[in-house]
Image (cartoon, grey):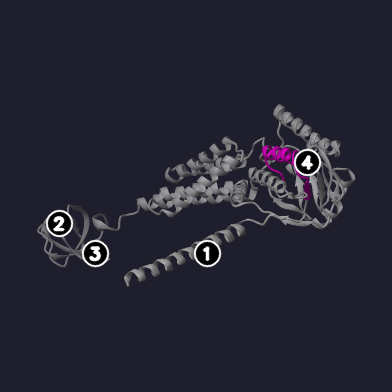
Amino acid sequence: MFGKISKKCSRRSGALLLKTGLFFTLFLSVFAASAQPPAPTQPHVDLIVVDGGINPAVDDFIRQSIGRARAGKARALIIQLDTPGGLLTSTRSIVKEILGAPVPIMVYVAPSGAGAGSAGVFITMAGHVAAMAPGTNIGAAHPVAGGGQEVKGVMGEKIENFTASFSETIAQQRGRNTEWAIQAVRRSVSITEKEALEKNVIDIVAKDIEDLLRQADGRKVEVDGRHQNLSVKSVRVVKYEMGLKQKIINILSDPNIAYLLLMAGILGLYMEFSHPGVIFPGVAGGIALLLALTSFQILPINYAGLLLIFLGVALLVGEAFLPSFGVLGIGGAISLGLGSLLLFDTQSSDLIVDRSIIFTAVGTLSAFMVLIGYLVVKSQKRKPTLGLQGLVGETGEVRVKLDPMGKIFVHGEYWNAESIDKGEIPPGAKVRVVGFDGMCLKVRRLSESMQGS
C-alpha cells in the first residue's frame, strides 16, 4: 500500500519538477528576448542620438553602434548630433572610427536649434553623409583651454596647427571644403546650415530623418575602400540608446556634475568631522567624493586648480577655529574660487564649469563651513548644563544645617554640601554652588540682598 502511494508521489513530483523546469526555461527565454531589441531582418538603418559633450562614454557608444550596425547588416548608421564640443582625445578616436567604418555613417546635426561646435565640426565632416536640420549651425573649432580662453605661446601654436591639419585631412578625405575647415579652427568661424550647404561643408539640409533618408538615397559613398550607392529610402529606422554603464559615465563626464560632487563631498566630510556620529553627511560625502574622483579619471583636470581648492577648504576650516579676524576666511574663499575656475583649465578639452555654479558653490560652501565652525566653537565655550559642572553657579536651599557639612536641595535633588564660609548655615538659607570635591558640593552663603534679587 505504502509502496503504491510512494510511486504515485514520485511520479507527481517528477511531473511537477518537469513542469517547473519548462516554465523556468520559458521565462528565461522570454526575459532574454525582451532584454535586447530584436535583430531587424527587413531593410533598416540604425539611429543613435548624441546630445551633450564629447567624452569617453560617447566614444564607446559610437564604437559599439558601428559594430552593431555591421553585425545587423544595417544599410547605414545615423548619428544625430548636438554638441558644444568636448575632449580632443575622444574626438580623434570617434573620427578614426567613422573614417574606417564598415557601414555608411550619416551625421545629422539636429533638431532645429542644435549645433555642432568645436569637436562636433570634425565628427560631422567625417561622416560619409553630412547633414543639418534647418535652424542649426556648425563651426567654432578653435582649440581653447578648459576655462574657454585661448592657449597662448608655443604650445598654443602647436595645438592650433595640429588641429587645423586634422580638420583639413578630414575634409580632404570626404571631399569637402578644406579652406573652410581650416578657418573653422584658426578663426573660429561659425555658419548656418544654408551657408554650410553652399560652401560644401555638408551634403544635405533635411527637416527630419525621413527627409534625410529620401535625399541620401542613391548617393555614392566610399565604405571600407569600396564605392557603393546608398539605398535607404523608406527603410525602417531602429533607434538605440546608451547602456546603463555608458549613461553613468556620460553623466560623470559632465564637468558641472563632477564639480558639484566634489563640493558636496568636501562639505559632507567636513560636517561629519565637526559633528562626529551624525553618520549620514559622512556617508553621503564619501560617496560624492569618490564619484568626483571617478569623474577626474575620465576628465582632464588641472592639478594646480585642485590643490587651490583643498587649500581654500583648509583656510576656511582655520578661520572657523582661529581668531584671524577674517583673513583666513577671505583667503580661503579666494583660493576656492580660483581653484574652481582652473580645475578643468587644460589643453586637451574645451569643457568648462558654468560660472554661476562656481560662484554659488563657493559662496555657499564658504558660508556654511564658517557658520558650522562658529557654532562648534561657541558650543565648546558654553557653560556645561549637565553633571557636576552644570551645578556650579546654581542657587540651592539648605535642608540640613551646614556646620560645615550638611545637605542642600538644588536642581530638584538632595546633595551633600560643605560650606566654605565660617560658621554654620541654618536650614532654609540660600547658598550658591561654587565648586565640588567628588560628590560633595562646595557652597557659599548668599547675602540677604542677593537672595531677594
The image shows residue 193, relative to residue 311, as above or below, that is below
Residue 443 horizontal side relative to residue 173, left or right: left
Q: Earlier in the sequence, mark 2 or mark 1?
A: 1
Residue 282's spot in the image, x, y percent? 44, 50
Q: Nearer the viewer, residue 237 or 138?
A: 237
Give the amino acid at mark 4. Ala
The C terminus - image quarter: bottom left
Q: Nearer the viewer, residue 375 or 37?
A: 37
Which class describes the residues within 10 Å of circle 2: few (<14), some (14-19), or many (20+)? many
The image shows residue 448, relative to residue 131, as above or below, that is below
Which class describes the residues within 10 Å of circle 4: few (<14), some (14-19), or many (20+)? many
Residue 262 horizontal side relative to residue 203, left or right: left
- Reading the image, the residue beneath label 1 is 23
Q: Is residue 257 magenta?
A: no
| SS at badge 1 | helix
The image shows residue 230, relative to residue 156, as above or below, that is below
Q: Which numbered tag is attached to residue 126?
A: 4
Q: Which residues are magenta?
A: 83-108
- Reading the image, the residue beneath label 2 is 419
Q: Which numbered tag is attached to residue 411?
A: 3
User: Real-space Cα distance between discs 3 and 1?
Assistant: 73 Å
